[in-house]
Image (cartoon, helix red, strand yellow):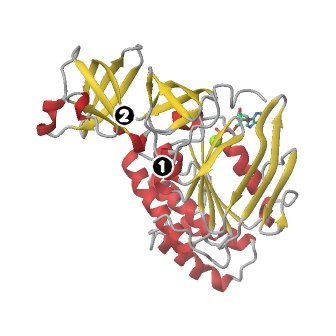
Amino acid sequence: MNQTRSHTAALPITIRRLTKRYGPLYALDRVDLDVRSGEFLTLLGPSGSGKTTLLMALAGFTRPDDGSIRFGTEEVIRRPPHKRDVGMVFQNYALFPHMNVQANISFPLRLRKVPARDIDERVREALARVQLEGLGERRIDQLSGGQRQRVALARAIVFEPRVLLMDEPLSALDKKLREHMQIELRRLHESLGMTTVYVTHDQREALTMSDRVAVINFGRVMQLDTPRKIYDLPANKFVADFIGESTFLPVEASSGKAWCQGRELLLADSVSVGGTGRQLLMLRPERLKLLPDEDAADDMNVFRGTVAQIAFQGESMLVVVRLEDGTEVGVRGVTRQQEMAAVPEVGGHAVLGLDRRDTVLIPDDDDAGGGR
Ligand code: ADP
Ligand code: MG
């Protein structure tokens, strides 16, 4: 699924020191980013982190203050949008409401002076790609939200651009349709293979769809990695906090060892404790186990506490455990009836186990990502 396919028309994008200021605010702060040829790369970050600004700079609608954007070997920073060979899909469709589907999709072809005899055929192909065969004559206001977004997508790909940019294209759709479209978009990308930069603030969407994810905050790239690495080995506290759920415990590091709550930590083989001083241990609810007692801990780090809360959540159950130092930690487990016996009562004593292989330290970078 997450294989990048090569495509003759796809291009790598090289972004260097890209900076955009609005008054004192750095919407983009010296961004370096390499998008591989044909890859599906997602910009993921909270609202206001600079995702749209970066996409608009790639499309040519925003003029950065400094830096460079190359498509392949060509510098495009001064090139206007219509000369960048970029297809673009926005959150709010941006279709022409007074034109029918056919006219909307053929618009970029007419703009590019494609001969009239080729236009019908290419629109038909694009409609088929987004599964809207036969709807060319429909008016835009006769379409559902999902169908409109498919029209917008067809219009973005009909001229076979070398780069496809999408800014939260699914966020106006309801959850079921959104999840369906995520899979369709991914399939479409696999068959077209164009270099794709996708923007979302939805971490699950980013992890589901992307070859790689760039986590953005304060106009900076906090981490660029595969979805699995982003989730399992976040580079800093911001990424660990933003992706998935986690609690952090302070860790003291010295001479290659790490101490947490008075005990030495067993660490994953891949982890080496660098430096001295404070780091953080990341605890994810689905990586912790409730153990009957400490003897059941096999190659695990153990944490003791009392059960503060138990919440049934359908497919899983969340148990909140208050550790001896007062930190509350979530433990998520399956709700199969036979495993319920292992769950203590609220107020009861709880022993948590964290497998050595899941024991990941993160730099304590509370000051990272603040101002400049
Ligand atoms: P995102 O898409 O991640 O939500 P944006 O790229 O839209 O973030 O915005 C990044 C920052 O730049 C925000 O603080 C936003 O308020 C600011 N910003 C964006 N566009 C403008 C503008 N035209 N004028 C002033 N500030 C802007
Ligand atoms: Mg935005």
Residue on which disc 1 sits: 205
The part of the image, by quadrant, that contains residue 301 is: top left
Q: Which mark is residue 285?
A: 2
| Most foreground residue, 324 or 31 | 324
Q: Is mark 1 within 8 Å of ligand 2?
A: no
Residue 251 — which label?
none
Q: Is 81 on the left-hand or right-hand side of 278?
A: right
- Amino acid type at circle 1 is Glu
Camera sees residue 154: yes
Q: Residue at x 76, y 60 (%)?
A: 14
Q: Is residue 182 above or below residue 365?
A: below
Residue plotted at (44% across, 54% down):
144
Instruction: Mark 2: give few (<14), some (14-19) or many (20+) Cα within 10 Å.
Output: some
Percent of width and height locating residue 167: 61, 50
Tell me which label, 1 or 2, sits earlier in the chain. 1
Where the C terminus falls, by quadrant?
top right
Taking the image as shown, residue 225 lies to the left or right of residue 327, namely right
Q: Secondary structure at mark 2?
A: helix
Image position, residue 320 (x, y; %): 32, 23
Comparing 311 with 140, the one in front is 311
Q: Is residue 95 left or right of residue 85?
A: left
Whether residue 237 appears in this view of the structure is no
Locate residue 109, reporting x and y percent: 69, 73
Residue 7 position in % (x across, y down): 62, 76
Q: Secondary structure at mark 1?
A: helix
State the separation of the CA atoms marked 1 and 2: 20 Å
